[in-house]
Image (cartoon, rainbow, N blue to C red):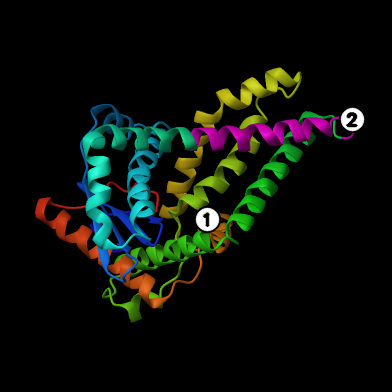
Amino acid sequence: MSQGKPVYGGQAVVEGVMFGGKKNTVTAIRRKDGSIDYYHIPRKPNKLLSSLKKVPFLRGIAAIIDASATGSKHLNFSSERYDLDPSEDEQLVQEVAPSKLGIIFSVAVIGVLSFLFSKFLFTLIPVFLANLTRPIFSSDFAQIFIESVFKLFLLLLYIYFVSLTPIIKRVFQYHGAEHKVINAYENGAELTIENVQTQSRLHYRCGSSFILFTVIVGFFVYMLVPTDPLWVRVVNRLALIPVVLGISFEVLQLTNKARHIPVLKWLGYPGLWLQLLTTKEPKDDQVEVAILSFNRLLELENEKKTGLDGEKIV
């Protein structure tokens, strides 16, 4: 990526793509009639989150909270409208208008809570499964290794089965389109469908890589605490979730910075391999939506000056 270029991140939504900069987040979706609809949210500075984003190991937690809250609003917009004819929008607006602020706040909170709930499940279920094998694998190292294997297996199994549903398959295609647009922008290519389609659908800063790093980092962090008795192990796993998330975010940033160094770029390969499941090759019309979303963001960002800090999950 060219030095001095702003860093942008994004997220696939239902039938569209969201991109975020320093001052704005924008979603473009393709509607039922083939038209393109946009959703724009100006970023409102949060002093606490802004302060935390400057502190190593804490900035990852702040970034996750921010991304979950903002992403939920955009996902809610896309899921409400993608299969709705534009002529029916007025009725939808009338339904949500009386409590719009409350709904937006609720969606943001639900997004954060959903992330935490899923994190709890993927953290605790492997603990109980691994504990069942204690008569065979009794040492702490063996227990933590088996626990990590179960966690990785459940993660891959979950991604595989959800990817079989038609709507999620298309979301994964838009995920690929999002990465292609970011790669094209960072490589200095003109944002045309033809140029974007030549780019990789994988990216070092992807949130999918972050999820995998939590499994790897967790393995080493859990080595520092006991696995017996079971209740202590459960408490440790819950208490260490922020620690694992914080370290994993730093690892994600490291792999992104090291991706152009031949000896170190392999650090990011496990995350890229996981993206082979969480992204699919997009069609031209999906890439078009991603380009339109990104161009709209650039227009808004250039009105106020650019980009994010370098710590954006793509």
Q: Amino acid at mark 2?
A: Pro
Nearer-the-camera pick, 15 or 2:
15
Q: Is residue 50 above or below residue 254?
A: above
Say whether residue 214 is magenta: no
Q: Is residue 273 left or right of residue 296?
A: right
| Residue 217 percent location from the top left of the image | 58, 39
- The residue at the point 42 percent across, 35 percent down is 110
User: On residue 135, which mark appears?
Assistant: 2
Residue that badge 1 annotates? 268
Dot 2 lies on which element?
Answer: loop
166, above or below 304, in the image? below
Asked if residue 6 shows in the view, the reply is no
Amino acid at pointer 1: Gly
Compared across the picture, whether 168 is left or right of 127 comes to left
For the N terminus, the quadrant is bottom left
Magenta residues span: 115-136
For the residue carrying disc 1, how many other residues have a C-alpha within 10 Å: few (<14), some (14-19), or many (20+)?
many
| x 11%, y 50%: residue | 304
